Amino acid sequence: MISKLNRRHIMGGVAAAALLATSSMAWAQTAWPNKPVKIVVPFAPGGTTDILARAIAPDLSKAFGQQFVIENKGGAGGNLGAEQVAKSAGDGYTLLMGTVGTHGINRALYAKLPYDPFKDFAPITLVAGVPNVMVVNAEKAAANKINNVKDFIQYAKANPGKLNMASSGNGTSIHLAGELFKSQTGIFMAHIPYRGSGPALLDLSGGNMDVMFDNLPSAIPLIKGGKLKALAVTSAQRSAAMPELPTIEEAAGLKGFEASSWFGLLAPAGTPADVVNRIQQEVAKSLASPALKERLATLGAIPSGNTPAQFAALIDAEHKKWAEVVKASGAKVD
């Protein structure tokens, strides 16, 4: 039988331990971040994922008093970078700029995915959504008299097996937009995956590729520079950044054609909720600033900054949507 004195000692010890644990937790929360935070971009520099990560990083660095550093780790349609973050400690010091590919498409496309897009991550916030744009090499388009989507379809059917379609990697929205286009038009183009939009766009503008369904922000500079010719956007509505471009449905009569992209921050599973919420709040503030809103608007990106719960619901809905597109297209990656 425990004496009253011993009981008081035990209860006092429990209370002290609880107080110590609470104090330690509070200290840990207020201390974060006490070193640089890494944002892993699962693609090569130059693509939209990279552009958006670098757009919000300076404001986060200023808000938290620590550098938010970008690390590019491309390959396998974003899977290598996503796997790295999934296996990192949930301490708030490693984040992922995820995409519709890494968290909406790849689970249905890849036979073996080295991470679980739901169980292995804590969604933070959707950063932005963007339309894709169908672009061709400007010189080739002029030489072959390709002025619109119908011209391209006619040319592709007249030259079966001769066209190469570039993408930022297997499973990206850029890849799936092309597969959807192929399935709805009945044309064949060889898919050539790269480790990101940057190197793919470089080869397309150099004439080594024929077509790409790139994210609008990364393609705009080359379109405006005359290296690429834009034929249409892949979204359901025209883009405010390039309102002169028709949608693919408008341009070619492909009913229901829609393949947009989105990009958002995620942390490894187990990251403290207060850290997740603090990051979300600062990202939302950054996206609401007039300077960044104007910059993103010129790129055709639509900023978000939604809550972790809202972002989680989006990921779930997008996975279901793209699983059907992958099945219909017949695309598979071993």
Image: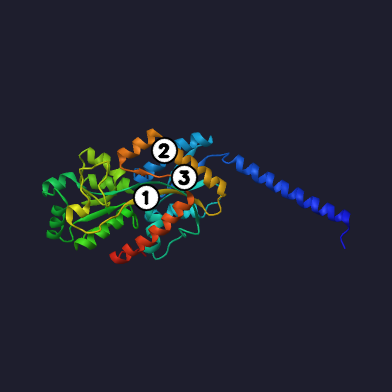
Q: Which mark is residue 262?
A: 1
In percent of the image, x 21 and y 55: which residue is there?
249
**Could you say where residue 317 lies in the image, as x and y percent from the top left?**
40, 59
Q: Look at label 3 and name its amino acid.
A: Ile
In percent of the image, x 49 and y 34: which residue is there?
62
Q: Look at label 1 and name its amino acid.
A: Trp
- Assess disc 1: are there few (<14), some (14-19) or many (≥20) residues with their C-alpha within 10 Å of its C-alpha: many
**Vertical side of 171 occupied by 300: above or below:** above
Quarter of the image with the C terminus is bottom left
Q: Which mark is residue 39?
A: 3
Dot placed on the residue nearer the N-terminal end, 2 or 1: 1
Q: Identify the secondary structure beneath mark 2.
A: helix
**Could you say where residue 178 lies in the image, as x and y percent from the top left?**
26, 56
Marks counted in the figure total 3
In percent of the image, x 79 and y 51: which residue is there?
13
Q: Which mark lies nearer to you, 2 or 1? A: 2
Asked if residue 149 lies left or right of residue 109, the reply is left
Asked if residue 42 lies left or right of residue 267, the reply is left
Q: Nearer the viewer, residue 164 or 257?
A: 257
Residue 79 shows up from this direction: no
Dot placed on the residue nearer the N-terminal end, 2 or 3: 3
**Could you say where residue 166 lies in the image, as x and y percent from the top left?**
27, 53
Q: Identify the secondary structure beneath mark 3.
A: strand
Residue 310 shows up from this direction: yes
Dot placed on the residue nearer the N-terminal end, 3 or 1: 3
Contact, mark 2 vs mark 1 (Cβ under 8 Å): no
Q: Which residue is mark 2?
A: 288
In percent of the image, x 48 and y 38: which residue is there?
60
**Vertical side of 285 occupied by 134: above or below:** below
